[in-house]
Image (tube, coloured by chain):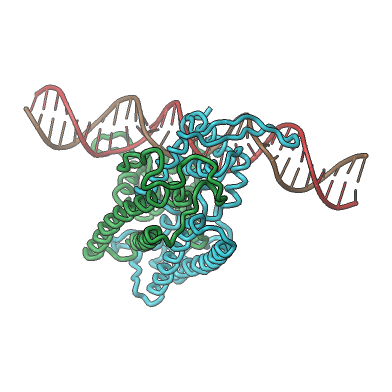
Chain colours: A cyan, B green, C brown, D red
Amino acid sequence: MPRRTLDNPLVPAVLGLLLEQPSHPYQMLAELRKRSDNNAAALNRGSLYNVVAALAEAGWVAAQGQQRAGNRPERTVYALTPTGHGELVRQLDSRIRNPEREFSRFLGAVTYLGALGPGGAAEALTERAGRLRERTAADEERLAEALASGVPRLHVIEAEYALSLARAELAWIDAIVDDIRTGALEWPAGPAGSGAGSGAGSSDSGPAASAAPAESGQPER
Amino acid sequence: MPRRTLDNPLVPAVLGLLLEQPSHPYQMLAELRKRSDNNAAALNRGSLYNVVAALAEAGWVAAQGQQRAGNRPERTVYALTPTGHGELVRQLDSRIRNPEREFSRFLGAVTYLGALGPGGAAEALTERAGRLRERTAADEERLAEALASGVPRLHVIEAEYALSLARAELAWIDAIVDDIRTGALEWPAGPAGSGAGSGAGSSDSGPAASAAPAESGQPER
DNA sequence: GCGCATATAGTCTATTTGGACTGTTAGAGT
DNA sequence: ACTCTAACAGTCCAAATAGACTATATGCGC
């Protein structure tokens, strides 16, 4: 029994999909998964059903009744209500108007970049740049293909946006790596800003500091 | 009784703080709040205590015993263990190396920009740009002041990074607004890519479509 | 024609989160 | 000296999430 999850990254995505055509949750999931890769929000079954239920409770979407095809488990098909359409517009508008501070794992990590030491930091950043460059190139290609095949540009602007940011990140990383290598970015030793080297971690050392920096392949999870 | 929240935006932040000096949760909270404004992660009491407990259970941090100053409620002071230091390095390294797709509310909204109609979209984007520009200018100033007052650049790179991205976003928004105004960005009518105007929302209309786009001041929450 | 892998659809529950609630104490105002 | 407020420090619980689990139905290989 959900209550009101009406502020949630999935909400605009669900409403947006229903704007195109009525659908049942499982189908939305599949559709969103397919479009994903930069699209919105981490996707999860439980969450989706939850959100849809909340949306239905709030009257933003309405069940159009059960269907059963072939004879799979019953699927409840939902459609956008006028209220829902209004709310979608309201939410989109609001989310666009107010820039919110967004936090990324990368931003969180960069904050403590110092702990890696100049060598370790440069190395890790360089690897990120490499991977990012590959991914970005692939995304660019996909975008170009989509446009070439007649998809209207409006329907892929989110990809354009993501690409812009990715390029900016790349440029930034390259610049920082350069500054580390040339010494333009100084590396104050030890923990805080205080010069006193109170503890752990020999003042800097070459590449990786103490503990081996993981298998550096997969994410840590 | 927490289990293992060891992958969590707060984790690097907490470990990073303890790298500077031992501290108790409430203090970390205050410190993180102060540094916030672009720093890492949404901050919340419950979550923080939870994370610290998990960290302690895992042996990444260790309680240094109770203290009571003046005579406030007891505060348990935690310090980073060698294991914790190693894990911090490992996590930072991993988060930097692997670029992950990050989802922002803005990205999610832009995906369905079409629903606002060209007028509504241009207007909303313009307002965002304005606010973003203000905020960015303020951030730039703060950054400059910090550097001028002797804070080592390494300790404010996350601000540099955030600024780079903000500037890129601004440039993108400006370009898109332009393309909308000049008509370079075409606006296919109706729901999906299908030309058929099946339903709600008169094909475009001026500024805001149906329902009034909120009090457009505060976030919707 | 029979079993097995996979796709379909959904439910259920253990972690996590956010934020309300509790209680203390130092300091400001009167 | 006495009350009142704001800062301090934490606990606790309802709401939300992620993802494991259930169950049927195709369709493929053998």
Q: Where does the image place residue A170, in percent across and percent down from the top left?
A: 45, 67
Q: Where does the image place residue B124, in percent across and percent down from the top left?
A: 35, 50
Total labels: the figure holds 0
- The foreground one among B186 and D8 is B186
Residue drawn where x is 56% and y is 47% of the image: B196
Residue B41 visible somewhere in the drawing = yes
Q: Where does the image place residue B202, in percent across and percent down from the top left?
A: 45, 43
A132 left or right, relative to A92: right
User: Which picture quadrant has residue A112?
Assistant: bottom left
Seen in the picture, residue B44 relative to D14 is either above or below; the reply is: below
- The foreground one among A168 and B62 is A168
Residue drawn where x is 57% and y is 52% of the image: A35
Q: Where does the image place residue B57, in percent across and percent down from the top left?
A: 49, 42
The extreme bottom residue here reads A182
Seen in the picture, residue B219 relative to D15 is either above or below; the reply is: below
Residue drawn where x is 54% and y is 35% of the image: A52
The quarter of the rendered structure image containing the C terminus of chain B is: top left
- The foreground one among A22 and A215 is A22
User: Which picture quadrant has residue A94?
Assistant: top left
Residue A215 visible somewhere in the drawing = no
